[in-house]
Image (cartoon, helix red, strand yellow):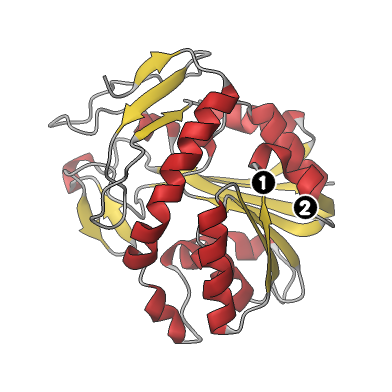
Amino acid sequence: MNGSNVDIDWESARHANKENWEDRVPVHAEAYGLDAFDDPEHLSDVVRDDLASLMPFLPPAGLSGLDLCHLQCHIGTDTVSLARAGATVTGVDFSPAALRTAREFAARLGIEATWVETDVLDARAAVAGDFDVVYTSIGTVTWLDDLDRWAAQIVALLRPGGTFFIRDGHPALYALDEEAPALTTRYSYFATGHAQQWDDDSTYAGDGRIAHARTYEWPHALSEILGALLRAGLRLVHFDEGRTLPWRFSERMVEVPGGYAWPVHERDLLPCTYTIVARRD
């Protein structure tokens, strides 16, 4: 049953997830609209939205001249967009295929970037240097079992005074039954000590099928996410919740400017995303 709680160790779950994400790379390389980046002014929709939230917490010149580490960067469309916004970028991901695509993509566009293959939970040991900004966005935290370890990597990567940014799917959204005819909870909102097992040979972008269909994710309440960052020593400077998503979580969602949302009569009932900006003092 999709979403059922299972006992599985981190290494086994990570191996299954890595095989799945390796399979997604060619599908996403076709579906992400990479040719649009031939326009030197083009930025990904995700980064356009994120910059609107991040800019008030950056110096007057924005990302220009800042060193930025993008955790869980996948095929690099957002990383390249952040470079175009002025940052010197390092992209981190555990998928060799994703990083090969990202490297080729950036090189084709003449964008300098550093790419590091590692688990995000081991990022500090694998990534050279430290950063003014650590960035992660959309579809990241549920793939991790240990948020205290995650937050420790972020703090260790940041320079004093550096800024952490995350926008991701809201834990309340992930507790919903995506197939129900109304907003109905089905899955755990709080961490249970177990992973959720999923078997799905599709992906959120493109029509290709995924050979390694089984994945494992972990529910994390908003309090757990914020708590991990605060325990690690970060200071919260901004928090927000949003009504739209950059992907269609449920077939009932409707297309709106900037992504997808619940039908109008449900739109104010439940958040779709959260945004956190935090600082290392």
Residue 36 lies, in percent from the top left, at: 39, 79
Q: Can residue 241 be seen in the rendering of this structure?
A: no
Q: Residue drawn 47% across and 36% down?
A: 17
Residue ID for mark 1 = 118
Residue type highlighted by circle 1: Thr
Residue type highlighted by circle 2: Val
Q: State the image quarter where residue 99 is shown.
A: bottom right
Q: Is residue 38 left or right of residue 270?
A: right
In the figure, 41 relative to 124: above or below? Answer: below
Q: Can residue 246 be seen in the rendering of this structure?
A: yes
Q: Residue drawn 44% across and 28% down?
A: 216
Residue 172 lies, in percent from the top left, at: 39, 30
SS category of the residue bearing label 1: loop
Q: Residue drawn 31% across and 47% down?
A: 203
* Separation of residues labelled 1 and 2 (CA atoms): 9 Å
Disc number at residue 127?
2
In the figure, 164 relative to 218: above or below? Answer: below
Q: How many marks?
A: 2
Image quarter of the N terminus = top left
SS category of the residue bearing label 2: loop
In the figure, 88 relative to 155: above or below? Answer: below
Residue furthest out toward the front? 211
Pick the residue in front: 91 or 60: 91
Residue 101 lies, in percent from the top left, at: 51, 65
Residue 215 lies, in percent from the top left, at: 41, 32
Report if the CB atoms under discs 1 and 2 are less than 8 Å apart.
yes
